[in-house]
Image (cartoon, helix red, strand yellow):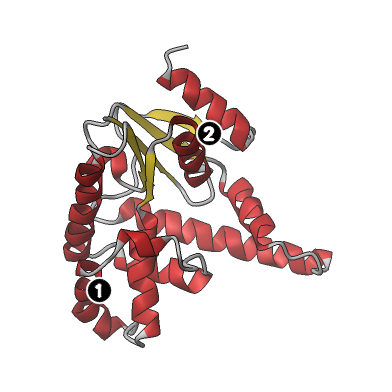
Amino acid sequence: MMKIAIDGTAASGKGTLARKLADKYGFVHLDTGLLYRKVAKELIKQNKNSSESLKEYDYEIAKDLDFLELRKEDLRTEEIAKLASLIATQSKLREILDLKQKQFVDESKNKFSGCILDGRDIGTKILPNADFKFFIDASVEIRAKRRLLEKNISFLHENDEKCMLQSLIKEMKARDSLDSTRVVAPLVPAKDAHFIDTSLISADELLLKVVKIIEGK
């Protein structure tokens, strides 16, 4: 089974790339960030998201995660994203979810000809022996603009849009710093990963670049 690891920053295009590759080759795909978002959502839902409650409850939630439920829920809110990034710094929680991700790969071996995982530590931690590794990034300004477009807010005045964009840039810089400086599994490119900057290319152009690498063209 071919294994593809895709890491990168928020809104860099790694998730879109992973989905497009999965569709093209008929591979199974796991957005590993959804695991942390699911735990975060349950903590919020159960009102266990205070600092003193996090470590006590997130482990139990993580142990019972069902992969099939991840795609059925809205896990993309800013509140969930912030909490997910915070709990991702906890070593014990990462151990549990690391095992879940590796279990997903093992269970896919007899069902699919390939698997694609995208996240923050796939090439360095989860699939260190992946057939192909990619690290996707873009300037924080470009990523913030993409996130703003995703919100599809058409009624904002120009000044309000600028304020929201600056707020997104600030949040992304903080998240990038948290992800890249955490002690456990920081966000860093694997030494043998193909680094691609998507600041000036579209999702289709990114897909073409990656397909050429995979197919040796």
When asked about the image quadrant of residue 116, the answer is top left
Q: Which residue is mark 2?
A: 197
Q: Does residue 124 show up?
A: yes
Q: Is residue 183 above or below residue 23?
A: below
Give, as a three-letter code, the residue at label 2.
Asp
Residue 98 vs residue 151: left or right? Answer: left
Residue 65 vs residue 159: left or right? Answer: left
* Label 1 crowd bin: few (<14), some (14–19), many (20+), radius 10 Å: some
Q: Is residue 164 above or below residue 119?
A: below
Q: Which residue is mark 1?
A: 61
How many badges with numbers are in the image? 2
Give x and y (percent) for residue 151. Answer: 66, 63
> What is the secondary structure assignment of the residue under circle 1?
helix
Please state which of residues 147 and 60 is positioned toward the viewer in this rendering.
60
Give, as a three-letter code, the residue at label 1.
Ile
Q: Earlier in the sequence, mark 2 or mark 1?
A: 1
Residue at the farthest top position: 217
Inter-mark Cα distance, 2 to 1:
35 Å
Please state which of residues 109 and 181 is positioned toward the viewer in this rendering.
109
Give x and y (percent) for residue 170. Answer: 55, 62
Residue 131 vs residue 91: left or right? Answer: right
Q: Could you tell me which residue is drawn at 49 percent across and 40 percent down?
A: 137
Q: Could you tell me which residue is drawn at 36 percent across and 88 percent down?
A: 47
* Label 2 crowd bin: few (<14), some (14–19), many (20+), radius 10 Å: some
Q: Could you tell me which residue is drawn at 27 percent across and 31 percent down?
A: 130
Q: Could you tell me which residue is drawn at 25 percent across and 49 percent down?
A: 104
Q: Does residue 85 show up?
A: no
